[in-house]
Image (cartoon, rainbow, N blue to C red):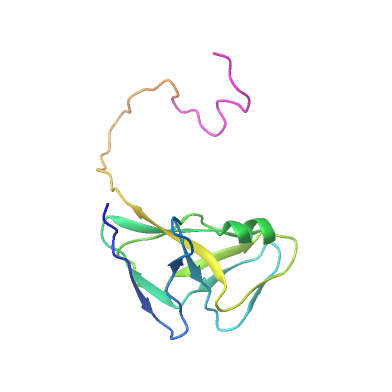
Amino acid sequence: MSKPLIQFKKLHPDARIPRYMTTFAAGMDIQALPEKNIVLAPGERTLIPTGLAAAIPPGYEIQVRPRSGLAIKHGISLVNSPGTIDADYRGEIGIIVINHGRELFTIEPGDRIAQLVVAPVCQGELREVAELLETDRGAGGFGHTGHKEAEV
């Protein structure tokens, strides 16, 4: 399987190109590059700059996902997880971080703040119709099957 070429441009000289931290990692870590330390209070969210822009080939996206270590140790996550960086976006990559923890959390330049996962994209053919085909499930959603194993 060939790997898609993801090009990164440093918008700031201190920006660091994301990298995979282990041989089989699905996500590459991206670092924060705020002008000064950012202190997030519990429940607070903010946009973290990275100093990077990317060129992603058509047919792919980059998904922005939380780092599990920050989540379990500090309650730090991403508001729109996974976020999407589209193939035609060329602006600075920003990470929307939220503090779900109980204590202040400080984000410093160079902190690994999220992970980026390259994923294929398929755009569907869209068509308006008057009726949809029926299914056994129908309009059931959000817990319609219950929370315990159903008897067969």
Task: Determine whether 77 is above or below 144 in the image.
Answer: below
Quarter of the figure with residue 91? bottom left
Give x and y (percent) for residue 8: 35, 73
At horizontal 55% and vertical 27% (from top left) the residue drawn is 144
Quarter of the figure with residue 27? bottom left
Give x and y (percent) for residue 152: 54, 13
Looking at the rendering, the stretch of residues picked out in magenta corresponds to 138-152
Query: Which residue extends farthest top?
Result: 152
- Residue nearest the viewer, comparing 28 with 121: 28
**Magenta stretch holds residue 125:** no
- Residue nearest the viewer, comparing 86 with 60: 60
Query: Which residue extends farthest bottom?
Result: 13
Query: Which residue extends farthest front?
Result: 23
- Residue nearest the viewer, comparing 12 with 29: 29
Query: Which residue extends farthest right?
Result: 102
At horizontal 27% and vertical 51% (from top left) the residue drawn is 1
